[in-house]
Every structure is written in C-alpha cells, then in structure tokens.
Image (cartoon, coloured by chain):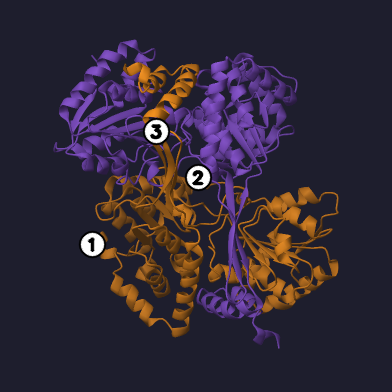
Chain colours: A orange, B purple
C-alpha cells in the first residue's frame, strides 16, 4: 500500500501543513558551485582546448578539434530517415502544432505620432543567436528540443545552435531527428558546464550566443546562473508539479494516472489533488494502489507520491481555486464540469488544462503550448517559455522641434530637482530661446 | 584639459581597444555578499523585530513597530501640496506621458478554436503585489518612482508598495509626491537588504510581494539577486551608457552636453561618440573642454569621460550602426539627418533617440518610454522595463473529446519513445477505444 497524504482544508493546521508540503529546498551545493566556477573560468581563458579536455574527461570522447565534435546535418537527416514511421509522424505532427500555437505569440513593432510631430514607439527584434542545451543519456527528450527550438525560430532568431553531451560517444538519434524537424541550425556533441561556458563566452570554434535555454543537471543549472548577465537564460526549473481540481465527474483512474504522469518524472515531483468529495478521493486512492504495480517507473512514482503528493478534501470548487492560486502550480488540471468557468477564477498557473479530456500529457507533447513552465510558485510572476523570450524591445523616441519646446521645459524642471544639471542643460539647448 | 580617448575604427587594434573600453568588472564583493545573506536570514527568521533592529542600526531611526514606519498617505498628499507649482506640474505632465506610452504595451488574452472543438490560448494576468525600492539620500529620484510604479499600475497590479530608507529620519518630499502621482498604494520608511528581505519573505506587518523592482546600492542589488526565485526581480543594472552616432549636422555643444548628461550620473558611466567627420570630433572635444568648468558635477564628468569615454572616428554611418549593434548600448542617440532611416539598421539598443531634438534627457524624464533600460550589452537579449514585466501568461488548453482521439495517439507515441509510460497511459485512457 502506498500511503499518500490525506489532508482537509477544514483542519486547523491546514495552511501550515500545505506550506510544509510545498516547501522545497533549492539551496545550492557548494562543491558543485566551485567546480562549475572553475570549469567556466578555464573555458573562458583557454577556449577550445579546455572544451576538448573536459569533453574527454567527463564524456570519454577524445576529439582532435572542436570541429570534429560538430554533428553534421547529414547525420541528423539520417537519424530522421531512420525513425520508425509512426514516431516520425508523431514528432512532425507535434512540431507543426507547437509552431502554429507559438505563431500566435509573435508581436509587432508599433509607434504613434503626437500632435506636434513627436513619434514614440517600440521596436521588436529577435535575438541574433540562441544556444539550446539538451541533456544526454536518459533525460534526452526530443519533445524538449521541439519546445525550446521552435519558439526561437518563430521569433526569427537567425541561428539556433544545440549542444548535447554524448557520454561514451553515443548520440541519440531521436534528439537529432527532433533538431532537424525543429529547424535547429548547428549542433555540437558537448555538454555540462563546459558547453554552457562555450556558448556564453565563445571559443575559437564556437561563436558566443545571446541566450541559453534548455534543461540540464545541477552543473548545467549552476553554470547558467553564473553566466546570466553575459547572456540571457531561461528560468532554472525546480521539480515538476501537477495540481488537479476535480469535482468527481472524471473517471477516478484517469485522475490517478494523471497524478502518476507527473510523479514518474522524478522523486521530487509533486502531484496534488483537490476535491470536495471525500468518497471520490477514496476512489482515486484505490486506483492509485491498483495501478501502481503495473507502472515501469513504480518506484519513482511511489517515492514522489509518498513524500510530496497529497489528496486534499476541500469545501467546494471555489475554495479549490483559492488554494490553486496560492500554490501557483506549474500544471493545473481543472477536471470538472464547466471547467472553462472555473478557470476564470485562476490567476496563477503555468498552464491551465480544462475538462476531463485535457490531460497534462497532451500538453507535454503536442497540444501546442509550451511545456517549459514556471515551477515552485514562480507562476505568480513568470510565464511559460515563448516567442517573447526570443525577442526584445527597443524604445523609439523621435522628438520634433516643436515637441522639444514642451518636453524640454518639463525635463529641465525635473532635472534641476534631481540635481542633474547636464540633463537640464541638454534639454534646454533644444529650446528655441537658447538658439536666438 | 580633459583627455578623452580618440579612437579610429581604421586602426589595426580597434576591435580589441573597443572591447577593453567596454569591459566592466561586475564581480561581486564577498563581504557584501556575506553581510547581505546574513541580513536576509535574520529578516526571514525574525520578521518585524529584525527589520526594526536593522533600521535602527543603519538608518538611525528608532521605531516601536513597523506600523510606525509606514508613511501615511496624508504625508504624501501634504508633500504633493507643498511642491512648487512648476515642479508639481512637471511631475504630473511626465506621469501622464509615461502612462499614455505604457498603455500601448498592454496585451490581451487570446484563444482560438480548432476544427474538432479543441480550444488553445494564452491568458494574461497582472501580478498581485509588487514592491518598489527607492534609494534614499542623494540618489532619491522622483522620476524613478514614476518609471517603476506607473507600468505596474497600467498592468493592473492591485497593490504597489514602496520602500525607501530615510537615514536620520529625513523623508524626501519629492519622492513622496511622485508616489502619490504614480498611484503607489503604501509606503514604508525602510531600506537596504532588510527591506528587500521583508518584501520577499513577508514579515508580521508587511505582506510578501511577487516581484521587486527599482534601483539600489550594492547591498540592495546583492539582496535582489539572492531573493530571485522566491520573487521576481527586474534586472540588476550596470553603469549607465550613452552611444551617440553623429553625422556632424547637430550643434557640437549639444552633443557635448548629451555626453555630459550620461557622464554626470557616476564615475563609471560610459559616453561614446561615433562620427565619420574628424573635424566634428575635434569640435565636440573643444566644446567638452569649454563647457566642463561650468558643470556642478564637473569632477564626476571628468573622471567618467577620461576613464570610460571615447570619441571614435568611423568610416561612415553604416559602420557606426554596425559598431552600435556590437555595443548594444543602453541609450543610442542617432543625431543625424534621416535618423529614422539610420535606425532601421539598429538591432540592439535599449532606447533609440532619433534626430537632433531627441536628447536622452527628454527620455529620462518625460518623453514617455521607460528610463529603466538594459545596460552592459544586455540589450542583445533584454528589454526596457515595461507593462509586460508586471504581467504573466498562463497557457490555456481545452482538448475536446474528438481532439483527444488525435492528440492522444501522438502523445502516447512520443511518451513511449521517452520511456514515460504513465504519460502514455494518461493519454490513452482518453481514447474511445479504451472506454468501450
């Protein structure tokens, strides 16, 4: 028997218990921090040589040059051609849907002209060059290649380069096929903090990028945090989470499996169910125990659900929404009747899945929206990865001769108030009175 | 005589010289890091008590409770009423223009329905609560209150709270007046890392916020970096920069004063002029020397221009644009004929000022666009502070019964490929074939 926590929002200490359940120690490991700092410094100072050295040491791949570590496009195409037909079709269909959704996120430059001829606006431009980190080994997810690369290409990024470690020289053909489908431009078989360093600082063979995205292990995360500022980075993700609000109308084994689909990611993943019906919670718990033995990743699921999962009895769906807003979950499934109306009450969530047919797994792969989502309550202030992460804005200011007469006086008054006389003079020089 | 560097893009070592000129050591001070970590820990553990203790120690303000440190709205209103008429009018005019510009940045939620009834979309919501840091003492800039608070209110943030240190108990009336005009909701006379900690973690008297914005000293910057993840933060700004592209048609003393207006901010500020006309560069240099003695902040300007400034001779305006894209300046003035056409070639800059009447100082105060801009080449991948920084997006996914039949097969195929069987089962449960 798996013992998943049963909580009730009516219990006296519920708020504290919930807070404890959500708590996650994101503190950084000092030895990883030091090792990462050293690797980055070596790559910054010695470029290709350091990169080759670390790749030999950590991935057991000996190459004479960084050029020899580039994975040629012919190899990606061969990988794509070698895929089983159903897998290729599924990847291509998923890519197409992700592309269509993200095209809705493209925004346009705008400007407006004021009565005195002054023009103000905002210019949108894509980043020049983006680096995509793809983990090697077991965590090499082709869906992650699609989700990271496609928004960048939709944004108009001219060059998307991929790095992926190949321990023992083993390259993952599905990842290469996904890169081909997603429109990645170049790829190198390098990984770890050394690959992050190469992308951030550039080496003799690899040009520096403007932003690095994609998941990675603790060294990769530490390296990304350290190079932030030199380049942009996406968020550093915490463990994955699902919160389900159910009214009891969805088959209980569907909901049990949805909880599993999050729990199977890793032992720290968090799966929580909110429901106003105690009998339904019993039923889901029975289904959890019935289905668990059949799961290939049963051990991970068991640990995750036992330590970080919960089935929570709530007063009603409104209270469930209030709790959801407090949790600000990465994934929120509203598995109820009239789910759309319930969703109106949700302010904070990475992705909102409405109705019993909207399982999170559909969103993970192919519904269209991005599966890179804010975790650990950061949905209170951050957003899914999107086209907007690969574009930036520049303010446009074209003050007319007449406009400078009005604005100059306002600016000068405020500048004198702040004790910035050069600011004031610069504005006043543009006044006609100063030029007669 | 002020000796500002004269460079030429034609010289052999130009690229390396430019790189050196731009280099800025952003390394963090270990003693500040440790002190900040300690302050944050104390505030997290002891809340109000720690906050009162540090406020007494650092600001020499002894208060019996945090409530006594709240600055009541009556005091803001009195400050506003007490302003000289021209200063109040200037602040109000600036606020109105900033508000109008930022209203153009508001974005709307969207969704679309597919043929099988599946609905996909993106929901935009404001952050619930934002904290605004306003430095005390000399660096207390009312314009900064407007630029940080107004976009948050335009975004729909329900509560914007301000914190500002008041060393010796001295409160800055112009800052309070600006808070009143900008629509700030509450304000406390606290500052430093302790105020950042209070906003991030919450105390008994101050509710935690979702994001902290606004400039501050090295302790404030270190604290913001450390609480990032618990809350959102704006960027950590480096020294301010201006790059001017001139064709020689703007009066030389205007351009000299524009360089000063950046240099007067602080010794590390960077002012660079690019021009294809050597005689014009001579003329600007003469104006610099002529005007410098009259500037109240002459010492700061001299240090800044000597150490970090440069007058650079370029081949032509096209080359100037290429150099500007490499520098990715915070502020770019295109002081040329047909500035709008020249701006077409600019890909990376925080704000682009076009034409001789568009001095940076107008943008700093009242043109409308935000004056919080990406520094230190980060305009390659980041944007001015804007309404979008106070909103976040949630993906919306409502898969229809029919849609689940198509998407379920694609998702299951990809999930099996990644070894995630619960994901596959969760998708397959929604297939009609599984429910007959």
Q: Circle 1 sits on which residue?
A: A64
Q: Circle 2 sits on which residue?
A: A30
How busy is the neighbourhood of tag 1: few (under 14 within 10 Å), some, or many (20 plus)? few
Q: Quadrant of the C terminus of chain B?
A: bottom right
| Residue contact at pointers 3 and 2, CB within 8 angstroms | no
How far apart in space, not on screen, are marks 3 and 2 (Cα)?
52 Å
How far apart in space, not on screen, are marks 3 and 1 (Cα)?
57 Å
Q: Quadrant of the N terminus of chain B?
A: top left
Q: Is circle 3 on the same chain as circle 2?
A: yes
Picture coordinates of residue A237, whole percent (x, y): 54, 54
How busy is the neighbourhood of tag 3: few (under 14 within 10 Å), some, or many (20 plus)? many
Q: Earlier in the sequence, mark 3 or mark 2?
A: 2
Q: Which chain contains the residue that carries disc 2?
A: A
Q: Circle 3 sits on which residue?
A: A399
Q: Closer to us: mark 3 or mark 1?
A: 3
| Residue contact at pointers 2 and 1, CB within 8 angstroms | no
Q: Is circle 2 on the same chain as circle 1?
A: yes
């Amino acid at each position: 028997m798996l013992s998943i926590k049963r909580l009730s929002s009516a219990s006296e200490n519920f708020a504290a218990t919930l807070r404890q359940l959500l708590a996650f120690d994101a503190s950084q490991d000092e030895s990883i921090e030091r090792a990462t700092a050293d690797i980055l410094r070596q790559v910054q100072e010695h470029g290709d040589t350091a990169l080759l050295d670390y790749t030999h040491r950590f991935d057991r791949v000996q190459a004479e040059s960084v050029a020899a570590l580039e994975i040629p496009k012919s190899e990606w195409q061969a990988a794509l051609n070698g895929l089983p037909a159903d897998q290729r079709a599924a990847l291509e269909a998923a890519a197409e849907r992700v592309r269509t959704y993200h095209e809705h996120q493209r925004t346009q430059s705008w400007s407006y002209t004021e009565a005195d001829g002054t023009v103000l606006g905002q210019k949108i431009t894509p980043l020049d060059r983006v680096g995509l980190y793809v983990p090697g080994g077991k965590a090499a997810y082709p869906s992650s290649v699609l989700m990271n690369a496609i928004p960048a290409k939709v944004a108009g990024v001219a060059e998307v380069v991929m790095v992926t470690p190949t321990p023992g020289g083993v390259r993952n053909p599905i990842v290469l096929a996904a890169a081909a489908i997603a429109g990645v431009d170049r790829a190198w078989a390098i990984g770890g903090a050394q690959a992050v360093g190469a992308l951030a600082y550039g080496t003799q063979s690899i040009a520096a990028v403007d932003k690095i995205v994609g998941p990675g292990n603790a060294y990769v995360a530490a390296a990304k945090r350290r190079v932030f500022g030199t380049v942009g980075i996406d968020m550093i993700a915490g463990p994955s989470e699902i919160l389900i609000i159910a009214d009891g109308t969805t088959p209980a084994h569907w909901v049990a499996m949805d909880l599993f689909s999050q729990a199977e990611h890793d032992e720290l993943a968090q799966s929580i169910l909110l429901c106003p019906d105690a009998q339904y919670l019993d039923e889901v718990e029975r289904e959890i125990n019935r289905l668990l033995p059949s799961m290939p990743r049963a051990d991970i699921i068991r640990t995750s659900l036992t330590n970080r999962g919960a089935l929570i009895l709530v007063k009603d769906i409104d209270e469930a929404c209030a709790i959801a807003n407090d949790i600000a979950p990465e994934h929120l499934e509203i598995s109820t009747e009239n789910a759309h109306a319930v969703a109106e009450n949700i302010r904070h969530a990475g992705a909102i899945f409405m109705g019993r047919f909207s399982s999170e797994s559909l969103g993970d792969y192919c519904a269209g929206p991005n599966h890179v989502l804010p975790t650990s309550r950061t949905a209170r202030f951050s957003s899914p990865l999107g086209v907007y992460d690969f574009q930036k804005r520049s303010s446009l200011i074209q003050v007319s001769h007449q406009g400078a007469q009005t604005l100059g006086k306002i600016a000068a008054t405020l500048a004198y108030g702040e004790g910035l006389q050069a600011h004031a003079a610069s504005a006043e020089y543009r006044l006609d009175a100063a030029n007669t």
